[in-house]
Image: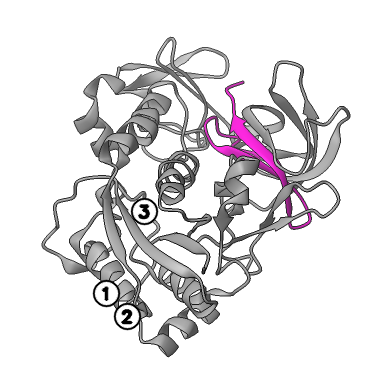
Amino acid sequence: MRERIVVGMSGGVDSSVAAALLVEDGYDVVGVTLRVWPWKEPDDAARRFGSCCSAETVDDARNVARRLGIPYYLLNTEETFARDVINRFVEDYRAGRTPVPCVACNRDLKFGTLLGRALAWDARAVATGHYARVTRDPVSARFLLWKAVDPRKDQSDFLWPLTQAQLAAARFPVGHLTKEEVRAHARRLGLVTAEKPESQEICFIPDDDYRGFLQRRDPSVFRPGRIVDTTGAVRGRHGGIANFTVGQRRGLGLTGDSPRYVVDLDPESDTVVVGSVEDLERDTLVATDVNFIAGERPAEPVKVEARIRHRHVPAAATVTANADGTATVAFEEAQRAVTPGQSVVWYQGDLVIGGGVIARR
């Protein structure tokens, strides 16, 4: 009997090729699209493709499944997504953090809800179009997460919270390919997604207008307050800390000769703190929700390269696991705009050691 694998099909070329490669390898493949958010189609077709819940997305995924000769299902997971991703997204902004909703979606939906459904269908694993790789250490028997072969497309920093059980059931068929090779596979197979452009937006936020989304979802997130500098002097007023993120320069509404940047957000007093570019630099941070993928919590400090946002070039650092479950990261050179709510991910070469969520200072 062939091993069954459920593929999360987003309607893009990466997940389409992931499904195709598994079919070619002889697996019993089932395609699934998770409907996570209701979507009203804009009139402009060029603006439609980004949503994971658009009619076009579902049509493309279904067409690919038909082309590959595999069963396809559309699952309504709006309630779960709202609870585990949307509500957390709103609360993070209320608390002065800048969240990464894809991290929660991967952990709680793709390798949570979908994996549970897959196991109920007698499947062994869930596959996605993520650019990352998983292996198993023959000595420790632990499952290891690695960067993708294509450094430009690597998405391992969105997968750092996955547990050993989740990694054991995770398949990333395109992780060993470049983007060009993925598109070549799609063209060879005549998939409708072969030339589909990539979406850089958050799937549930049209036009990348997160402020408008928050305003519609929960207007109470926007509480007015003061803008102060690092000495405590009041420099202005604002309409809510959710309008800002650490490192932001534009949209502050301040006058003066020297450029000002957001260096901190205080949700308790609804205060935005601004300062110079030098005030943005930090040589240490504390991470919460820590997950050490490659091994148990280390008893001694570990040398790593740490990435503090998706496009950040990993920087040399030392990670120390704390008794309270947090971790302290000390950089060899100060890093700019260390942003609460973002992920900090630790690497040794291409191996993902682990990660956590950057806490407020």
Rendered position, 299 above or below 45: above
Q: Residue at x 52, y 55 (%)?
A: 125
Rendered position, 63 above or below 185: above
Left or right of 112 in this view: 169: right
Residue lying farthest to the bottom in this orientation: 188
Rendered position, 264 above or below 119: above
- Are the residues at dot 2 and dot 1 in contact (C-beta closer than 8 Å)? yes
SS type, badge 2: helix
In which quarter of the view is residue 81 placed? Answer: top left
Name the residue carrying label 3.
201
- N-term mark: 3 or 1: 1
Rendered position, 156 above or below 256: below
The residue range painted magenta reads 336-361
In which quarter of the view is residue 53 placed? Answer: bottom left
Which amino acid type is shown beneath numbered disc 2? Arg
- N-term mark: 3 or 2: 2
Front residue of 224 and 321? 321
Front residue of 246 and 81? 81
SS type, badge 3: loop
Left or right of 192 in this view: 331: right
Name the residue carrying label 1.
63
Q: Give yes or no for residue 350 being in the magenta stretch.
A: yes
SS type, badge 1: helix
**Residue 24, how many percent across, how many down?**
50, 80
- Are the residues at dot 3 and dot 1 in contact (C-beta closer than 8 Å)? no
Which amino acid type is shown beneath numbered disc 3? Glu
Left or right of 71 in this view: 147: right
Name the residue carrying label 2.
67
Which amino acid type is shown beneath numbered disc 1? Asn
How far apart are the alpha carbons under marks 3 and 2?
A: 28 Å
